[in-house]
Amino acid sequence: MLHLLSPLSVRNTHLKNRIVMPPMASNSGTLEGMATEATFEYYQERAEQGVGLIIVEHTYVLESGKYRERQLGIYSDDHVGPLRELVHRIHAAGAAVGIQITHSGAATRSSTIGRKPLGPSAIPLSPDHDLPAEIAPSSIPSLIEAFASAARRAAAAGFDMVELHGAHGYLLNQFFSPLTNIRSDEYGGSREGRLRFPLETVEAVRSAVGPNIAVFYRLGADDGVPGGLTVNDACWAAPQLARAGVDAIDVSGGLGGSSLPGYSGEGYFAPLSEAIKGVVNLPVMVTGGVTTPQAADLLVRQGKADLVGVGRALLADSGWAARAIQVLSG
């Protein structure tokens, strides 16, 4: 029977176990988004404790997509050198490593980027957010290319995988959600239209990284807001993402963050991951409130997920994975 300590291969990346450190902002970058010694030490400390895969926090593909001040960036070739050193440190510590790429779209603020935010439609993400400018159809190819260029930089830095962030109210999520996309062109309207930008972005990233690097997609499987995306939409979208070139689905939810009413307990997004596992033939990862090794192990044993993201527990305790391995091996 498969369990948390079982190995897993995703494309050409071999994972020694199914414990994943999911992307969580460390706020350790420079103002230009460069990884620093603090970044290296933060990830190295956790890689040394037995984590199978570390997914480095969300990195912005364009300056217009920056979400916070000291967020890591991947929008220029200058970022490759520091990221290559980060990959080296994590690999030397024994873990596989990926990186999440994103554009925050309407989730950012003009005070952060010095200009009006962009969105699929001129709809604020919440009453507290700025009114974004609707992205012109002529600008969409350059946005897709920005993701592809970022993925090429990730490959040049030596990452084993690249994850596109399609959850938590960032741009890819905004395009798919009917709450934030009311466009009347080919990138809006029906589910097919709203998913077009994410699918074209996946295809561009798949082509950019070549055959050896895995592509993950963090799928916002429930907006958690009336009229928004539901698990039925996610189960419709997941097979299409797979056909476009995704190697694994990282399940999350929440148009305004990952905490949703009605989801509680350890592995609270497991009902979503279990549903998505039923419609795709590729690894599915789940995150959400996992704090104990036993709960993480049970998610895999019960077939609710193939990979388990342990977020806040790893943030609070860098030795979580080592203790989990000890407990589950006893």
Image (cartoon, helix red, strand yellow):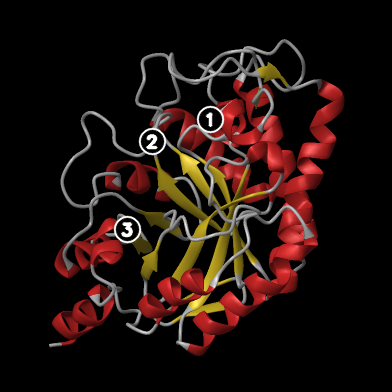
Q: Report the front residue among 196 and 162.
A: 162
Q: Which type of secondary structure does the marked residue at label 2 adopt?
A: loop
Taking the spot 34% from the left edge, 41% from the top edge, the residue there is: 272
Q: What residue sits right under mark 1 in the picture?
A: 107
Q: What residue sits right under mark 3 in the picture?
A: 311
Horizontally, is 217 left or right of 267 in the view? right
Taking the spot 69% from the left edge, 36% from the top edge, the residue there is: 64
Relative to 182, residue 33 above or below? below
Residue 132 picture quarter:
top right
Q: Amino acid at mark 1?
A: Ala
Figure label count: 3
Taking the spot 55% from the left edge, 32% from the top edge, the residue there is: 108
First along the sequence among labels 2 and 3:
2
Q: What residue sits right under mark 2 in the picture?
A: 257
First along the sequence among labels 1 and 2:
1
Q: Which type of secondary structure does the marked residue at label 3 adopt?
A: loop
Q: Position of residue 318 (x, y in %)?
A: 29, 73
Spatial CA span between label 3 and label 1 = 22 Å
Looking at this rendering, what residue extends furthest in the right direction? 138
